[in-house]
């Protein structure tokens, strides 16, 4: 087998066709990565090789068949295949020798693409700001794809003596297995059969992110083994032999059996630097316990600039990760609800989405003709039976740059989807009560929290003086939203008994009066004083003590402050406020991701 492998590699590299084929592959790939605006890394704006791994499969559909077309077709045409059979080689050794030689040649074609990795590594801001682990995982996926295409090309070369016919058949089969099953699954009569799982696209996209799932690995191994077995079968049939009792048949059966078993017992290897595709135990537990089918419809579809493409890709990746642990109960699709509609139809759709909780927005896009506005709907609906929960994917916060808002949105995806799925699957809405009667935050100040919670909970106000204890026990959570007046002993007693019987209380208490809005309006100065809430003794019994101190930290956030007036207009500047420290959470709960991850930028040189 080694002699066959060496002969094939030497023969191929001795011809001009090899260098022309690989050279054209690298040239076209370079054009897609650096020149064509729709896939250019410079236009994308972030240090990554997503364009390479999205474009390479389509180029492989032509490169790999060009490498494999002569493997067996040329041998049979020149009459050297019969001479090969006279050597002390089995049919299995001939097939595997030629297959491994083709795989090595595919690897030779991939090695020069490392120059693109080095280019992005050098251009990154700061230099080296690229996820090397994720790139390694993506290259593993591309290598597995090339190995599968090599097996398909070898099979096509075995059934004909004409290299051009072998090339054409191999291109067709590679395209069909990569995209054909996805197209078939889109047919109305075949949508429920899950045919996309038989195609390469779903498995390759999963691995190309930098995550190696054993189910995807076994898929590529089984696909390659299937076409190697077909090649072996064709060679035996051409010589009038039978497959009965062959080791290859037993090996293929064993591999298929292992592949089917891997759907139930699997593991995943996340090569990314910050393990961003590793779900928290909380999210895995929610997905593992799904009892009903869940459908997620994402409206973030269309042609977007680089930043929004990142959110689109991250959303698809997150749903793929959640789907991996759902035992087939989670399905999702991406769609554009306003595509092809006139202005009246678009307005109707937008109003309907707003009424159901989604927030459309306008995206500013720079073009050669200036700045244009594009209406997008960065949201999704999670549907379980007749229950539908909206998910707004784009998180907006004041005083944050576009990159920071986008980064926050991507980090929030796991919590956004898992919480929405949990709400949609829950039976009924548990009640949540915000206390009143102690000068707490008003309904206007709590509006965003109440609206957000209303998707999965019944939200309202409760007065501890008036509410009967039997009614208080039915409350799922009691929130004390920043009171200013003291609690009575009766109210404290009700809270204590509520907690002792399993109730939950969220204490949002300020012991010192120091408000940001007052700080902004008084030139950066304010008198802070203690609040008397009469809760110290009760909290101390629970092992909690809230000090009457303000924490000052040189590592603090910035707030807008009026620093003077120019031309009758207030001058607003962002200045650090020492009493607004930046805390770095270490929790792995899906409500917060690891804080060390920042959006990767790439320098664009004009």
Image (cartoon, grey):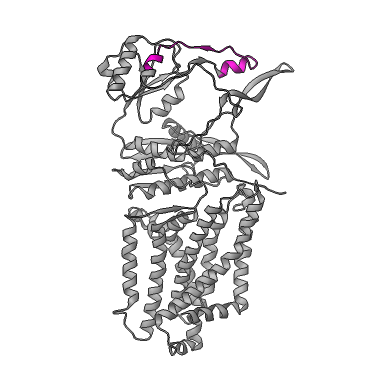
Q: Position of residue 537 (x, y in %)?
A: 38, 14
Q: Position of residue 451 (x, y in %)?
A: 42, 26
Name the outermost residue toward the left. Answer: 470
Residue at the image position 34 percent from the left and 58 percent from the top:
262
Residue at the image position 33 percent from the left and 40 percent from the top:
384
Q: Position of residue 140 (x, y in %)?
A: 49, 60
Extent of the magenta region: 516-538
Quadrant for residue 220, please give it: bottom left
Let me know if residue 167 appears in the view: no
Quadrant for residue 388, please give it: top left
Quadrant for residue 227, please give it: bottom left
Let me know if residue 284 appears in the view: yes
For residue 249, side relative to residue 380 (left or right): left
| In the image, residue 526 lies in the stretch drawn in magenta | yes
For residue 595, side relative to residue 486 (left or right): right
Name the outermost residue toward the right. Answer: 567
Answer above or below: position of 174 versus 426. below
Q: Total marks drawn?
A: 0
Q: Position of residue 597 (x, y in %)?
A: 54, 42
In this view of the protein, which residue sits in the foreground, 201 or 324? 324
For residue 191, side relative to residue 468 (left or right): right
Answer above or below: position of 60 versus 373. below
| In the image, residue 328 lies in the stretch drawn in magenta | no
């Amino acid at each position: 087998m080694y002699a066959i492998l060496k002969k094939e590699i030497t023969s191929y590299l001795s011809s001009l066709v090899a260098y022309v084929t690989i050279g054209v592959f690298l040239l076209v790939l370079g054009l897609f990565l650096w020149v064509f605006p729709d896939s250019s890394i410079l236009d994308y704006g972030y240090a990554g090789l997503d364009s390479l791994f999205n474009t390479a499969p389509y180029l492989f559909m032509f490169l790999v068949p060009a490498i494999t077309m002569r493997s067996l077709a040329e041998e049979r045409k020149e009459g050297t295949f019969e001479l090969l059979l006279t050597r002390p080689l089995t049919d299995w050794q001939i097939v595997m020798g030629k297959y491994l030689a083709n795989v090595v040649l595919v690897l030779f074609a991939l090695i020069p693409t490392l120059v693109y990795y080095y280019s992005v590594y050098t251009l990154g801001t700061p230099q080296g700001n690229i996820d090397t682990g994720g790139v390694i995982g993506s290259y593993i996926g591309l290598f597995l794809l090339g190995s599968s295409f090599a097996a398909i090309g070898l099979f096509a070369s075995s059934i004909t003596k004409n290299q051009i016919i072998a090339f054409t058949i191999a291109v067709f089969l590679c395209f069909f297995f990569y995209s054909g099953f996805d197209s078939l699954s889109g047919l109305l009569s075949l949508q429920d059969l899950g045919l996309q799982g038989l195609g390469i696209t779903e498995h390759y996209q999963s691995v190309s992110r930098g995550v190696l799932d054993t189910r995807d690995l076994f898929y590529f191994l089984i696909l390659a083994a299937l076409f190697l077995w077909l090649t072996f079968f064709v060679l035996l049939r051409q010589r009038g032999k039978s497959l009965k009792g062959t080791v290859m048949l037993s090996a293929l059966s064993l591999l298929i059996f292992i592949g089917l078993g891997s759907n139930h017992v699997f593991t995943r290897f996340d090569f990314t630097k910050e393990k961003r595709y590793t779900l928290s135990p909380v999210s895995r537990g929610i997905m593992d316990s799904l009892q009903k089918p869940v459908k997620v419809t994402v409206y973030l579809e269309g042609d977007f600039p680089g930043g929004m493409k990142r959110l689109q890709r991250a959303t698809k990746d997150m749903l793929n990760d959640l789907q991996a642990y759902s035992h087939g109960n989670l399905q999702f699709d991406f769609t554009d609800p306003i595509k092809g509609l006139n202005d009246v139809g678009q307005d109707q759709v937008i109003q309907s989405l707003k009424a159901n909780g989604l927030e459309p927005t306008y995206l500013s896009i720079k073009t050669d003709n200036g700045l244009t506005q594009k209406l997008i709907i960065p949201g999704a609906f999670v549907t379980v039976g007749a229950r539908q929960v909206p998910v707004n994917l784009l998180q907006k916060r004041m005083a944050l740059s576009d990159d920071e808002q986008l980064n926050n949105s991507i980090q929030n995806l796991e919590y956004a989807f898992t919480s929405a799925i949990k709400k949609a699957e829950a039976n009924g809405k548990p009640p949540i009560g915000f206390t009143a009667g102690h000068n707490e935050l008003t309904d206007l100040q709590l509006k965003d929290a109440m609206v957000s919670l209303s998707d999965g909970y019944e939200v309202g106000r409760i007065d501890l003086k008036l509410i009967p204890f039997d009614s208080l026990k039915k409350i799922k959570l009691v929130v004390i939203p920043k009171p200013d007046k003291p609690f009575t002993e009766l109210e404290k007693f009700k809270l204590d008994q509520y907690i002792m019987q399993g109730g939950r209380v969220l204490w949002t208490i300020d012991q010192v009066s120091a408000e940001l809005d007052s700080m902004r309006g008084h030139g950066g100065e304010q008198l802070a004083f203690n609040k008397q809430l009469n809760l110290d003794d009760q909290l101390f019994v629970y092992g909690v003590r809230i000090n009457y101190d303000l924490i000052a930290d040189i590592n603090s956030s910035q707030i807008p402050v009026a620093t003077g007036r120019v031309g009758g207009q207030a001058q607003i500047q962002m200045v650090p406020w020492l009493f607004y420290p930046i805390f770095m959470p270490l929790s792995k709960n899906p409500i917060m991701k690891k804080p060390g991850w920042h959006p990767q930028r790439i320098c664009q040189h004009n």
